[in-house]
Image: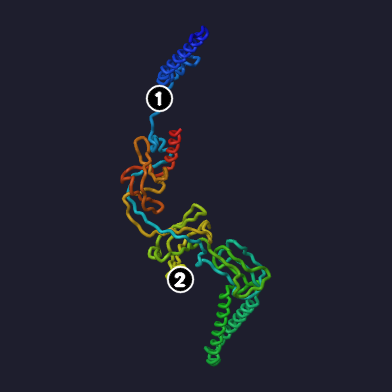
Amino acid sequence: MSLTHKQKAAMAAIILVGLLAGAAMLTGGLAAPVDHDEHGHAAASRDEHGDEHGDEHGHEQEGAVENAEPNTHADRVTLSAEQIRIAGITVEAADSARIRSSVEFPGEIRFNEDRTAHVVPRLAGVVESVPADLGQEVRKGDVLAIIASPALAEHRSELLAAEQRLRLASTTHEREKQLWQDKISAEQDYLQARASLQEARIAVQGAQQKLAAIGAPRVASELNRFELRAPFGGTVIEKHITLGEAVAADAEAFTLSDLSTVWAEFNVSAQDIVKVRVGERASVSSTAFTGTAEGTVAYVGSLIGERTRTAKARVTLTNPNRAWRPGLFVTVSVAVEEQQVPVAVPADAIQTIDNTPAVFVEVHGGFAARPVTLGRSDGTQVEVKQGLGAGERYAATNSFILKSELGKGSAEHTH
């Protein structure tokens, strides 16, 4: 079939378009490796600034690599001697030490019962005044309450009468003695006068002892006035007496405790009873505050409780600032064994880095954090089983500063 002129022209146009498309595809395939290998220059050539922009970009990248600081180890802190001095970091050589291992027990602060008293009037009466208040600090001999007591009036009257009879008996005795010596009266009269004098003296002593037993002085502005006084210095922790109240002789008017010392009581299980002995050193701590107190075990019970299967023990603590309040829950740590360890460091020298204990060892130009394996500890010294040898120098104080600097370096390295 013959083709018309128009058909021939259309076919020629189609063939020409196909050839041009194939040439374009071939040209793009050849250019792709150039764009991949010379990415910086080729990309820049498409910029309006031409090849000059691409050259500057490449030059800047090379300069950045040349001027970068040397990479530092992630576990090392670089410090000069002056910086170490300003930071207060002291360097010591690892050495052996004696460490006392301890056993911890939960306990509670209680009143020192040897210095706690329930103050009673020791005679009946009516309360006239109560100078002491609950929680008040009192000294020995301070007046806690004033009571009007008929019984006290009788005791003082008895003493006054006995003293009067003593004076009379003494006068009679002296007269009869002189008359007997002068041979005027019989010896029987003298002996009777001497017996009466001795009886009068006994009566006076008896009346005085009655007053002394209740803590009342011989004389007062009123015969029935009784002043209830503090038996020792301490704090009024309970008060069961009010103005105008009639009190019995054995009524507990006040509870007084000397809080300058307290007891830290704790229970010792049967398996630990052989470890806790009277005289052992102990430390007491509380989660309520950061302070600790040192003392010695003053008492260990001889009996095991039938229900608890534990024995009572206590540590006597000095309490000058009244920080250890009765009722406070504490932890009592009793030192039970002392051993010599080859290498030990202060507890402050140990830092936790990536959840691992570490010590900052002195290296050239600063310190390096070195993981260590710990052993026994007495709260002050910590045994180092692995990671630090005897004689190696390490940061003994203010090592937390090195940990902080190490953290800053890690953050900068990450960014």
- Asked if residue 370 lies left or right of residue 25, the reply is left
User: Quadrant location of residue 173?
Assistant: bottom right
Whole-percent x, y for residue 265 in the image? 48, 63
The answer, for residue 240, to whether it is visible in the render is yes
Q: Amino acid at mark 2?
A: Glu
Local secondary structure at mark 1: helix
Local secondary structure at mark 2: loop
Count the numbered circles shown: 2
| x 40%, y 61%: residue | 280
Whole-percent x, y for residue 332 in the image? 45, 59
**Nearest to the observer: residue 376 or residue 248:** 376
Which circle marks residue 65 in the picture?
1
User: Quadrant location of residue 168?
Assistant: bottom right
**Nearest to the observer: residue 17 or residue 374:** 17
**Nearest to the observer: residue 105 or residue 234:** 105
The answer, for residue 55, to whether it is visible in the render is no
Q: Are marks 2 and 1 in contact (CB under 8 Å)?
A: no
Whole-percent x, y for residue 365 in the image? 36, 35
Whole-percent x, y for residue 263 in the image? 49, 63
Q: Earlier in the sequence, mark 2 or mark 1?
A: 1
Which circle marks residue 148 in the picture?
none
Vertical arrangement, residue 289 with respect to residue 63, above or below: below
Q: Residues within 10 Å of mark 2 (few under 14, many from 20)?
A: few
Q: Amino acid at mark 1?
A: Val
Vertical arrangement, residue 263 with respect to residue 245, above or below: above
| x 57%, y 73%: residue | 215
What is the distance, in whole Å, between disc 2 and disc 1 at their CAs?
78 Å
The residue at which mark 2 appears reads as 306
**Nearest to the observer: residue 155 or residue 336:** 336
